[in-house]
Amino acid sequence: MSDRPESAVLAEAAAAAGYAPSVHNTQPWRWRVSERGLDLFADRSRQLQVADTHGRLLVMSCGAALHHLRVALAAQGWAALVQRMPDPNDPDHLAHVDLGERVEVTAEAMRLFQAIRLRHTDRRPVSDTPVAAEALDAVRAAMTAEGIDVHVLTADQVLELGSASARADQIEVTDPQQLEELAYWVGGDRASGVGVPDTALVDSPPQTVVPGRDFVRQGTLRTGEGHDREAAYAVLFGQSDEPADWLRAGEAMSAGWLIASELGLSVLPFSAVIEVLATREFLRRLLSGVGSPYLVLRLGSPDPLHSGPPHTPRLPAEQIIEMAD
């Protein structure tokens, strides 16, 4: 039985949560450790004010960090007691976390924790090896276990998604405010610890059925000759479209992504189709109106000739974790 202070356990887990994926690597979360436990807040200073006006992707990013925290605590032998949206008067207070009972540290808990550092975003085309049905089922099961529905697109729906993704990009790259925001968060060496560096951007447009986001600049990551014909596309959705749902969707994204990383799959989120109202409504119709879409994920087998792209930078723990007196 560990005699470490609970505050130290929570702070260490919050530091590990800093490796979670976030839109444009904005890392829009803030943690406060106190005698009462750990609190997660949205940091609006790192919100995409143009592309994500309502904070949907910000809260989803924070949800991914919350799930990473839960994984880190499980790897330390702790159950996490999570209260989501604990303060109705403070929409930026996204979660309160207490340590629950001591639990057995399983091999699966350690594999998931190790996947936190292995996980990365790869914008290159995937290989011609289809995603095994068993692997896709495992990823989907991990996401649905977080209370979020998942629809894997049919071949015809993938073609429709390609058209919608191209339309979303066209709308965004012709908006001067969007371009200004992109330039702020994307490109360069990102010495500030946030944003997407050139090393994580492809050096030429990839061959693809579903075009990824147009960052309006080239990076230094070699695109390669592959195509995404054998990729699978999954839409995360739910019955309502409120901050609590976005938080859960982020947790589901993290859960599926870590399992995918453990299985050696490449994951690429598509958020532009969510940012643009017209294409978000298209996704709703594609789901036959049974739910609100939160995010699209591309899943594929990475090209064996490619090494993993460099990880994006991260903010120092002291900038995202506050130790309250």
Image: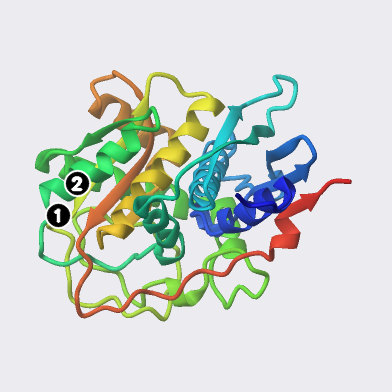
**Foreground residue among 289 and 233:** 233
Q: Residues within 10 Å of mark 2 (few under 14, many from 20)?
A: many
Q: Which mark is residue 136?
A: 2
- 224 relative to 57, above or below: below
Residue at image position (75%, 44%) is: 32
Q: Are marks 1 and 2 in contact (CB under 8 Å)?
A: yes
Q: Position of residue 188 (x, y in %)?
A: 56, 76
Question: Residue farthest to the front?
Answer: 1
Task: Locate residue 81: give its quadrant.
Answer: top right
Q: How is the image coloured?
A: rainbow
Residue 88 visible in the displayed image:
yes
Sequence order check, earlier mark of 1 and 2: 1
Q: Position of residue 317 (x, y in %)?
A: 69, 61
Q: Residues within 10 Å of mark 1 (few under 14, many from 20)?
A: some
Q: Which mark is residue 131?
A: 1
Three-letter residue code for mark 2? Leu
Give the alpha-carbon distance from disc 1 to disc 2, as whole Å.
7 Å
